[in-house]
Image: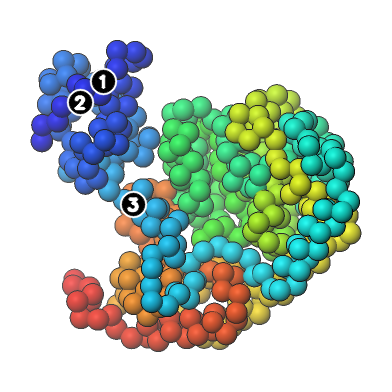
Amino acid sequence: MTIDLTPYLSDTGPKYLSIARALSEAVRQGELVPGTRLPPHRQLAESLGVSVQTVSRAYAQAEKMGLVQARVGSGTWINALDDARESAYLRGQEVRHEAPLIDLSIAHPVCPPGHHLRFRQALMELAEQASPEVITACRPIAGLLHQRERASVWLQTRLHVPGELDDRILCNGAAHALMLAISSVVQHGDLVLTEALTDHGLIALSRTLGFQLRGVSIDAEGIVPEALELACQRFKPRALYLTPTQLNPTGATMSETRRDAVAEVLARHRVWLIEDDVHALLEAPGFTPVTSRIPQLGFHVTSLTKITVPGLRAGYLTVPRGQLHHVLPRMRATTWMATPLVFEIADRWLADGTVEAMAAEQRDLLGQRQRLAARLLGHHTLESRPTSLHVWVTLPDAWRAEELQQQAEQEGLAITTAVPFMVEQTPPPRRIRLSLGAEQDIERLQEGLKRLAVLLDEAPPPMMQIVY
């Protein structure tokens, strides 16, 4: 096809970057729509008066930005997959239905009435007792000293996260902490490795910050050390984003031996580690973070949202010694400082044992729900942890994941396919992720699992059946 990028080209910067940005602007203004095939390199080079090499670099940069995908033997296409599918995933139940869908799609802790009462009580106590410092604070940027001190002790003693007080930063949730960590050591165009299936938030962040993301093979324990070694040798990555405990969406959890092996690879190749340990408290004490093995290279992130209530956006970032001065300017630019009132609740709950009590309760509740899922769906192939938020389900041969998702919605169920978690543009696995915490009423969860079991045991409707 013929396209005119001239109105969107800039005279500043390298020509290949100008072309890549022009493609992005043309998409944003609707001149290029998802699914459009771009001209061959030579044709676009001739129309713009540049070299073929320049166009090749522009297309490669656009691919790093998530804007296009190159298909072997077919050319380069405006990306028709990620943004639309991610948006649909994040919208969740904003789509209107006659009756609310039974939600098996969103990662959410179980929040029984007792959790709500604890939160309300904490708010009432703060209204009576909070010091002026907590209410009016706008510094220090890393967080109030007493809140950081207690968090630092807890991180050391409970989660075995290395570091001292001056290595800790309070953040507005784990997503905020991850953005700070990655942006501190990863520049535009850098390569970051991660699991072949990874948290959808990282995929969105790669587009926002403009770094390249590449998936590494995984198994039942998560990332495969031998595959990581080969990727480090071949691609010379800047960092690895890793979820060693209850990987989303598969639930894979690394043994201590696997964590040792991964740390050894990173240390040998001097690759930064961004460790997402947000599910740590959903496991009983016993695992140690990968960061504890390579503290000089590891950024550790965790939060309280998965074991208390999602509204308690208390995230904790531990940085390698000497990196704080890189992180604090980004903290100031994005939110100035984390909300002190939120962390005052977290501080009190850490002090009086509420956090540990709620974590133990969350593990019990999820254990009950995992057993329910195993009883109703156990004749299918399931992967999960005894206290995980999710179940990773292999579909019968007759079903494809997208078709099952559509049919499930017709039956009043919201489920999630692998697509939002895919790093590479490859055929998605025939799997679905079920989240067990979003439905607070366990009877609704049970009803949803029963409906899903019926669907899995039946053949798809004729119009959906796969033709080989």
Q: CA distance from mark 3 to mark 1?
A: 26 Å
Residue holding disc 3: 84
In the image, what residue occupies the spot 81% across and 67% down? 357
Q: Residues within 10 Å of mark 2 (few under 14, many from 20)?
A: some
Q: Report the amino acid beneath label 2.
A: Leu
Q: Position of residue 203 (x, y in %)?
A: 46, 45
Residue holding disc 2: 5
Q: Position of residue 65 (x, y in %)?
A: 38, 35
Does label 3 or label 1 sit earlier along the sequence? 1
Q: Dot 1 lies on which element?
A: loop
Q: Report the amino acid beneath label 1.
A: Leu
Q: Residues within 10 Å of mark 1 (few under 14, many from 20)?
A: some
Tell me whether circle 1 and circle 2 mark residues in contact (CB < 8 Å): yes
Residue 393 is labelled as none
Q: From the viewer's side, name the closer residue of 411 and 216.
A: 411
Q: CA distance from mark 1 to mark 2?
A: 6 Å
Does label 2 or label 3 sit earlier along the sequence? 2
Q: CA distance from mark 2 to mark 3?
A: 24 Å
In the image, what residue occupies the spot 74% across and 52% down? 288
Residue holding disc 1: 9
